[in-house]
Image (tube, rainbow, N blue to C red):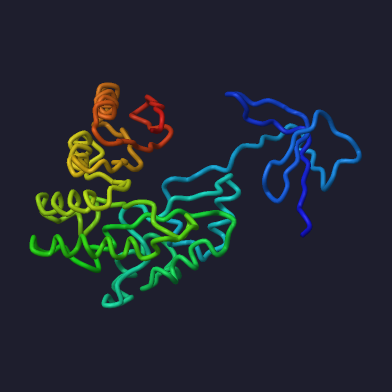
Amino acid sequence: MSQSVLTFLNARVWQNGRFTQPGPFSVVDGKIAGHHARYSEGMEGVCIDLEGGYIIPGITDIHTHADFTASDARSRDYALRQGVTRQVSGLCGFHPVYDSSIPKEDYIRYTGFLGDIAMLDTDWHRFFNRLNAGGPVTRYQLFGLNSFLYSFPLDSDEVIETRIDQVLEQYNVLEGEADPSRCFHGFSLSLNYHPVKSLPAERLYRFMNGLLCKMPVCCSYHVRDQKDKILESIQEVMAWHEGTGARCHISHLKFGGASHEGQFPARYEVLKNWQQESAFPLSWDTYVCLCVKHHYFVFPNH
């Protein structure tokens, strides 16, 4: 089988904490295969002079709704133009798969704000067959608990255990898949969207803690309040992880707005202390730069 060989010249490469300009290097079938001290006329394959351009690893976008736009080539191309080669999808509790007992028109009304409806389906196998069919951007899917509870309401305490078992049955539908792009990589849930938004706190606690005890995987949260009650909102979801060992991840954490003016350093310090003292992994992703009136705070992702 013939191999695709590219040799790049005059590239800036991120190495040991800074950009350097090593000699030419070769890429064989999409993987870096060798480094040369200098360019020579006899080098194999196509040579591309980057003229001082930068080469970086493919970026992973950890907050997308790409599972709703995976059938649209424009979405893939837009990601590639930004250097994104992997996406985490299924955020904020939503995914495109719904139960066949739900009219499609109803589910479109529920999830329509997320984009294209072409990926909506009632079968997880068909969905995963299509999710990464377009390549080359790879999508890693979370199981959206808001979407699940739309199809299977948590409308009484008596159904909590039944709903947990139903989640696990769907989550494990592709159990044994060797391809990481054809299985789930955790849960997601938003406390800002129905039906979760209106659930009694104790019922929601029992459901989530019971689920994570049985399936201790990462759960990504859109917490209830990102203003002056942000720490209380984070504590709410942290409580569900006690005794489970499951990672608690706060999605698109932000300290923006007047309610954080003068409070950000102290509040962020509290969060870092919780991370150090927690019995389970606690992490978050953030917007890179947030504006509180005219002051800009830049803080690291965890």
Residue 76 lies, with reference to residue 173, above or below; the image says above
Which residue is at a point 14% across and 56% down the rendered structure image? 199
Q: Position of residue 97 (x, y in %)?
A: 36, 67
User: Which residue is at the front of the view, 244 or 191?
Assistant: 244
Give the position of the N terminus as an image quadrant: bottom right
| 219 relative to 111, above or below | above
Give left or right: position of 79 versus 123.
Answer: right
Q: How many marks?
A: 0
In front: 34, or 23?
34
Outermost residue, front direction? 176
Q: Residue 273: x, y in percent?
A: 26, 24
* Residue nearest the observer in this picture, 14 or 243: 243
User: Which residue shows up at 24% across the image and 36% down it?
Assistant: 227
Q: Quadrant of residue 184?
A: bottom left
The reply, left or right, for residue 111 in relation to residue 69 is left
In the displayed image of the protein, which residue is found farthest to the right?
A: 41
Position of the C terminus, as image quadrant, is: top left
Percent of width and height locating residue 275: 28, 29
Left or right: residue 91 compared with residue 205: right
Where is residue 146 shown, x and y percent of the image?
26, 58
